[in-house]
Image: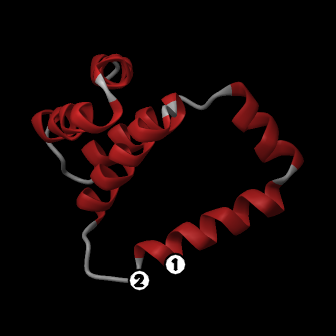
Amino acid sequence: MYLPEIFKTFLEKHKDIADAYQQAGDLCSKAGPIDSKTQHLIQLGVAVGIGSKGGVRSHARRALEAGATEEEVTQAVLMSGSIVGFPAMIAAFGWVHEVLAAR
């Protein structure tokens, strides 16, 4: 599984903060009726929107693990193009391709 080096360093130095963020994320996941696959597809779209390579890779992988198809993950990225623009969409498409190639 891909983890950026800076994130690994953060986990080592600030485990308590990382744990608190994880707990907050878990609470948000349980706050309503949206299933895990859809949650990760939504988070994938948000990650594309902010240009987060780590977020795109993480949520693409996690969406696939939650049962999303490659086509669903790809469509989530393609749908971002009209909002974030073609260059950002293509960058995210490349990051997702890395995840798919590693499967």
Residue neighbourhood size for the residue with mark 1, other residues' Cα within 10 Å, grouped as few (<14), some (14–19), many (≥20): few
The quadrant in which residue 8 appears is: top right
- Up-down relation of residue 54 to residue 59 (above or below): above
In this figure, which residue is indicated by the disc labeled 2?
31
Find residue 27 and report its horizontal and vertical position in percent: 52, 78
Residue extending furthest right? 13
Horizontal relation, residue 31 to residue 37: left or right: right
Q: Residue at image x 29%, y 47%? A: 63
Horizontal relation, residue 26 to residue 61: left or right: right
Horizontal relation, residue 65 to residue 6: left or right: left
Find residue 14 and report its horizontal and vertical position in percent: 85, 52
**Helix, strand or loop under label 2:** loop
Q: Residue at image x 36%, y 38%? A: 61
Type of the residue with mark 1: Leu
Type of the residue with mark 2: Ala
- In this view of the protein, which residue sits in the foreground, 61 or 50? 50
The quadrant in which residue 56 appears is: top left
Find residue 71 and report its horizontal and vertical position in percent: 10, 34
- Up-down relation of residue 27 to residue 37 (above or below): below
Q: Residue at image x 33%, y 82%? A: 32
In this figure, which residue is indicated by the disc labeled 1?
27
- Up-down relation of residue 12 to residue 89 (above or below): below
**Res 1 visible:** no
- Up-down relation of residue 73 to residue 87 (above or below): below
**Res 14 visible:** yes
Residue neighbourhood size for the residue with mark 2, other residues' Cα within 10 Å, grouped as few (<14), some (14–19), many (≥20): few
Q: Residue at image x 14%, y 41%? A: 72
Query: Disc 2 vs disc 1: Cβ atoms closer than 8 Å?
Result: yes
Colour scheme used in the picture? secondary structure
- In this view of the protein, which residue sits in the foreground, 42 or 63? 42
The C terminus: image quadrant: top left
**Helix, strand or loop under label 1:** helix
